[in-house]
Image (cartoon, rainbow, N blue to C red):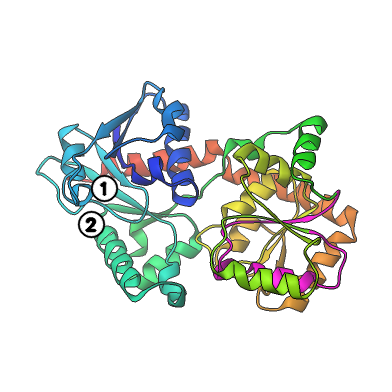
């Protein structure tokens, strides 16, 4: 097979959609090396050079016009005789030539419809139009969770038989076991407490970090936070200052991927009380790190966390506090949950994800033109 990808996010997003794109192409190129994987974009980036060294991953430059991604990329994939074109981030090119090509799009989430208050009117309209158009154009749609599948059916009227759920995995760094010396080095570099709860992700209202900070007020539980700050963070910093919690809540900056993986393994508990996610990769990262998880009982998060994570009402600070203290004060319970959750998280292994994706591609090729 020759598969073309919209690689804008692959080359230029450092987190979320970028990680999904890079992991997907890397995994397929390693597990199914007989195929060719063509990356269509205006330009590449330094961080992806290593992946482009693989003989079956090829960069294909598209023209630099303002709308070339929408108007030219699909035709370029047809000129290259791609069997399949995969839109990795909720959209597909608008223009195509006459050559046969199957189309598939991945939809990650519909946060802009679930929580419209976090988006401008224009962003909501353009995202809705792009996603709906892509779902209509595609021969098949990939949803990254059962929750996202339900949302696609509800908001875009996409028939269930057109949607396939293919979960995500996380970066290899989170699946390695690090030595005590390696962990100690990172703990020293970032001056980490001996025990702490960890929160990872962009610090925005939807991720709900403020509720965690309020929940640990008056306890001796240190919180370590790793994530890009937004305007929402100012509110949290004000609360921390007003309640003299500066030593209790630690914000880390400039954390590399492998350093983050080691911090997960050093953490006592991982907490992620998000209001809505398409999938929740940080939960998978924690479970592969053998760190017990507390997360929300909403959206897809129970899909990612499994039956041995601990679930909270994310809007109830008393519930969050009680669950934190329950795990914090019970080492044997933490151990039990982390062991069972580690067994559960193997369903998100690279082998399984690759197998599920290739199955979708083969199904596409079986469809009549």
Q: Look at the numbered disc 1 and give the secondary structure of its residue.
A: strand
Q: Look at the numbered disc 2 and give the secondary structure of its residue.
A: helix
Name the residue at 62% across, 36% down: 173
Name the residue at 15% across, 51% down: 95
* Image x and y of residue 194, in percent: 86, 48
Quadrant containing the C terminus in the rendered view: top left
Query: Residue 28, can we see it?
Result: no
**First-in-chain label (2 vs 1):** 1
Contact? badges 2 and 1 (CB < 8 Å): yes
* Image x and y of residue 259, in percent: 67, 39
Q: Give whichever of 204, 91 is nearer the camera.
A: 204
Check disc 1 and report the residue beneath it: 103
- Kindly identify which numbered label has been placed on residue 137: 2
Q: Give whichever of 310, 194 is nearer the camera.
A: 194
Question: For the residue carrying disc 1, how many other residues have a C-alpha within 10 Å: few (<14), some (14-19), or many (20+)?
Answer: many
Could you tell me how far apart the alpha carbons at marks 2 and 1 are, in whole angstroms? Answer: 7 Å
Quarter of image, res 240: bottom right
The residue range painted magenta reads: 194-222
């Amino acid at each position: 097979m020759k598969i073309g990808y919209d690689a804008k996010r692959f080359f230029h997003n450092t987190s979320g959609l970028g990680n999904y794109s890079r992991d997907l192409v890397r995994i397929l190129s390693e597990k199914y090396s007989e195929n060719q994987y063509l990356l269509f974009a205006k330009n590449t980036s330094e961080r992806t050079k290593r992946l482009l060294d693989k003989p079956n991953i090829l960069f294909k430059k598209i023209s630099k016009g303002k709308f070339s991604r929408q108007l030219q990329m699909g035709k370029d994939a047809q000129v290259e005789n791609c069997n399949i074109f995969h839109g990795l981030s909720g959209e597909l090119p608008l223009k195509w030539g006459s050559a046969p090509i199957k189309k598939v799009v991945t939809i990650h989430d519909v946060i802009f419809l679930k929580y419209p208050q976090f988006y401008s009117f224009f962003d909501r309209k353009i995202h809705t139009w792009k996603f709906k158009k892509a779902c209509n154009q595609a021969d098949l749609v990939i949803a990254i969770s059962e929750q996202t599948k339900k949302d696609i059916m509800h908001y875009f009227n996409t028939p269930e038989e057109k949607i396939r759920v293919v979960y995500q995995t996380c970066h290899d760094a989170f699946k390695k076991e690090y030595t005590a010396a390696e962990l100690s080095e990172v703990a020293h570099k970032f001056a980490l407490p001996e025990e702490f709860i960890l929160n990872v992700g962009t610090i925005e209202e939807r991720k709900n970090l403020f509720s965690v900070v309020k929940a640990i007020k008056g306890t001796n539980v240190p919180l370590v936070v790793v994530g890009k700050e937004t305007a929402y963070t100012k509110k949290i910093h004000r609360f921390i200052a007003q309640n003299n919690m500066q030593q209790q809540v630690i914000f880390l900056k400039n954390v590399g991927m492998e350093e983050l993986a080691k911090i997960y393994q050093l953490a006592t508990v991982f907490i992620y009380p998000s209001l809505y996610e398409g999938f929740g990769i940080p939960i998978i990262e924690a479970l592969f790190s053998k760190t017990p998880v507390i997360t929300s009982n909403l959206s897809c998060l129970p899909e990612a966390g499994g039956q041995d994570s601990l679930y909270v009402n994310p809007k109830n600070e008393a519930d969050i506090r009680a669950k934190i203290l329950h795990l914090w004060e019970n080492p044997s319970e933490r151990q039990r949950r982390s062991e069972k959750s580690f067994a559960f998280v193997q369903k998100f292994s690279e082998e399984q994800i690759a197998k599920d994706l290739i199955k979708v591609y083969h199904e596409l090729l079986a469809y009549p033109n």
